Image (cartoon, grey):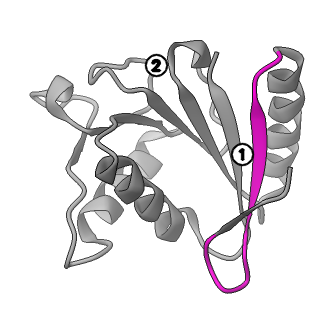
């Protein structure tokens, strides 16, 4: 069963926070699947991961690419795991068919969107009922994350 970490975005946007987390995942040598709720956000995240820091590089690609198995970070709107990822990243309350096939699930949600916050609360309850190991992280004023639960 996956460890579930909820990341409540309050001070930074997804476009600012996700690249930092993906850089850490990549540095550890792990693979991740990032599932987003729609093609528009998939295209945005793809661009952000290429452009976020000119001094660094996060190798990744997205659904429909020629070599998905070779991508350390794979972006999708589906439930495939072509790169053998051990980390699943769920964006803005998107649902996953099976979080249990991953070691860790990073659940990132926009705290400025009431609909997404309500969905995240429901998902928290649902994951808790499965007995998953869970934690809740909030952004600090000065940056970074603080474990709250």
Residue at 63 percent of width and 34 percent of height: 94
Q: Position of residue 35 (x, y in %)?
A: 48, 35
What residue sits right under mark 1 in the picture?
A: 6
Mark 2 surroundings: few (<14), some (14-19) or many (≥20) residues within 10 A: some
Check residue 134 for magenta coloring.
yes
Residue at 46 percent of width and 50 percent of height: 41
**How many circles with numbers are drawn on the protein?**
2
Give residue 79's mark.
2
Q: Is residue 68 above or below residue 109?
A: above
Q: CA distance from mark 1 to mark 2?
A: 19 Å
Q: Is residue 73 above or below residue 112?
A: above
**Residue 61 falls in image quadrant:** top left
Q: Find the magenta span and give its range.
A: 131-144
Q: Position of residue 146 (x, y in %)?
A: 73, 65
Mark 1 surroundings: few (<14), some (14-19) or many (≥20) residues within 10 A: many
Taking depth in this image into account, of 28 and 33 the one nearest to the observer is 28
């Amino acid at each position: 069963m996956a460890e579930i970490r909820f990341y409540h975005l309050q001070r930074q946007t997804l476009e600012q926070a996700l690249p930092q987390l993906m850089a850490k995942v990549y540095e550890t040598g792990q693979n991740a699947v990032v599932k987003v709720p729609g093609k528009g956000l998939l295209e945005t995240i793809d661009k952000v991961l290429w452009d976020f820091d000119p001094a660094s590089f996060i190798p990744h690609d997205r659904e429909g690419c020629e070599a998905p198995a070779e991508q350390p970070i794979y972006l999708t709107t589906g439930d495939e795991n072509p790169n053998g990822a051990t980390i699943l990243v769920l964006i803005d309350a998107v649902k996953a068919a099976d979080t249990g096939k991953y070691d860790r699930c990073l659940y990132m949600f926009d705290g400025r969107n009431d609909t997404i916050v309500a969905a995240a609360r429901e998902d928290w309850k649902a994951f808790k009922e499965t007995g998953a190991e869970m934690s809740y992280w909030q952004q600090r004023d000065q940056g970074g994350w603080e474990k709250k639960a």
